[in-house]
Image (tube, grey):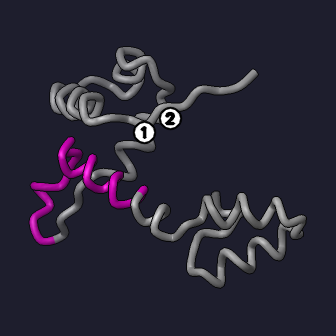
Amino acid sequence: MRRTYSQIDMDERRRIARWRAAGLSVTVIAEKLGRHRSTIFRELKRNAFEDPQMPDLSGYYCVTANEMARERRAKLRKCGFHKVRDKDFSNSRTPMECTLTVRHRNCRTIAGL
């Protein structure tokens, strides 16, 4: 059975920010969005804004979160990891050779995904 996957979009990020500000728990937010609670925890952890100079401003903001997620995806695309992985496996390389190729190009390792 294949899993379906969809990235969190701006509309969902707006809802998460609004509901967190209203004091709803992550479990309730996940149920309302129809996602697993670990997805919401991960979203809040990865895309939370932190300002050491002014800690009162730290928190989850939907626009900032969306920009952080976009930059992270763009970095992976720029790195070309998905192209390296597909190409190297089709050439019958060993996983270690693929890992070394990816590291050489300053990308994530296969084990790190």
Q: Number of numbered discs present?
A: 2
Q: Main secondary structure of the magenta part?
A: helix
Residue visible at 82% across and 76% down in the picture: 97
Residue 42 drawn at (x, y percent) = 45, 43
5 vs 67, left or right, is right
99, 93: nearer the viewer: 93
Residue 98 drawn at (x, y percent) = 77, 71
Q: Which mark is residue 111?
A: none
Neighbourhood count class around disc 1 (C-alpha, 10 Å): few under 14, some 14–19, many 20 upward: few
Quadrant in the picture for residue 102: bottom right
Q: Which residue is mark 1?
A: 41
Q: Which residues are magenta?
A: 53-73
Residue 47 drawn at (x, y percent) = 32, 51
37 vs 66, left or right, is right
Residue visible at 83% across and 73% down in the picture: 96
Residue visible at 64% across and 57% down in the picture: 113
Q: Which mark is residue 38?
A: 2
Q: Amino acid at mark 1?
A: Phe
